[in-house]
Amino acid sequence: MKTLSLFVTGTDTGVGKTRVSAALLQALSAHHSRVVGMKPVAAGTELINGVMSNEDVVALRAASTCAVPPELDNPVLLPDPVSPHIAAARAGVKIDIAHLVACHRALETLADAVVVEGAGGFLVPLSDLETGADLAQALALPVVLVVGLRLGCLNHALLTLEAIQARGLTLAGWVANHVDPAMLAQQDNLAFLRQKIQAPLLATIPYQRVPDPDALRFNLPLEWQ
Ligand SMILES: Nc1ncnc2c1ncn2[C@@H]1O[C@H](COP(=O)(O)OP(=O)(O)OP(=O)(O)O)[C@@H](O)[C@H]1O
Ligand SMILES: [Mg+2]
């Protein structure tokens, strides 16, 4: 059977892409024996269990059910927690989209489902000329949009939808993530998004101070099962 691959983007940085990708991996693992997360470009390292690591990469590995070579699930690891193009310039690294695509294709041979977490928001710069959208387009994967429900998210969601469509990519689904418990009119915002986004709502994630993926329910499209 062909490997299922998805590209997870978000309305901004810090909206819950990693939270959702990890939960999605867990939901997919009910249907696929080998699920693996991929963070093509990670910016920002810290000491985790005595090793300088990126927390997204660590979280995605913890949610994966098969171990893969680290140069495949995280080909570019940059020390500074800044925009990838700046982090790459500071590290003297050139981000090569063709190489990232080759790593993803290699992962597809090792797993039954691959969840790729993009960096930042959809148009995050990877170099002076290329963005995360160019990577998504080169990967040619269905996109999952994580909307972090907070003030400003409706504008961010509509802009991201336009950008996904302009690239000729398919929005396969979206996730409403309650990142701000103090946000006003959460249900009105959700209703607006449900009306505007044609793709299926895969999950609504409540505010959970401590992540509890077991408490979440994903409506996975049949072709992902
Ligand atoms: N549903 C939620 N309830 C409570 N906190 C959340 C929720 N979703 C995300 N968070 C918190 O918000 C922060 C950002 O989440 P996360 O790291 O998943 O975002 P991201 O979009 O992956 O960020 P980045 O752009 O850095 O990759 C984290 O501290 C996370 O624990
Ligand atoms: Mg993340």
Image (cartoon, rainbow, N blue to C red):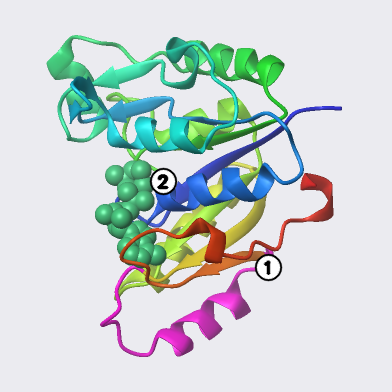
Badge 2 residue CB within 8 Å of ligand 2: yes
Residue 120 visible? The answer is no
Q: Say whether residue 182 is magenta.
A: yes
Tell me which image quadrant ligand 1 sits in.
Answer: bottom left
Give the residue type that dot 2 points to.
Thr
Residue 93 spot, x, y in % from top left: 25, 10
Residue at point 34%, 61% (across, down): 210
Give the answer, above or below, for where 210 lies relative to 7. Answer: below
> Horizontal placement of 214 versus 153: left or right?
right
- The image's mark for residue 14 is none
- Which of pointers 2 and 1 indicates the residue nearer the eye? 2
Badge 2 density bin: few <14, some 14–19, many ≥20, Cα 10 Å: many
Residue 9 spot, x, y in % from top left: 47, 47
Q: How many marks?
A: 2
Residue at point 77%, 46% (across, down): 224
Image quarter for residue 120?
A: top left
> Horizontal placement of 15 versus 182: left or right?
right
Residue at point 46%, 89% (across, down): 188
Q: Quadrant of the N terminus?
A: top right
Residue tagged 1: 198
Give the residue type that dot 1 points to.
Gln
Image quarter for residue 147?
A: bottom left
> Horizontal placement of 212 versus 29: left or right?
left
Callout 1 secondary element: loop
The range drawn in magenta is 179-200
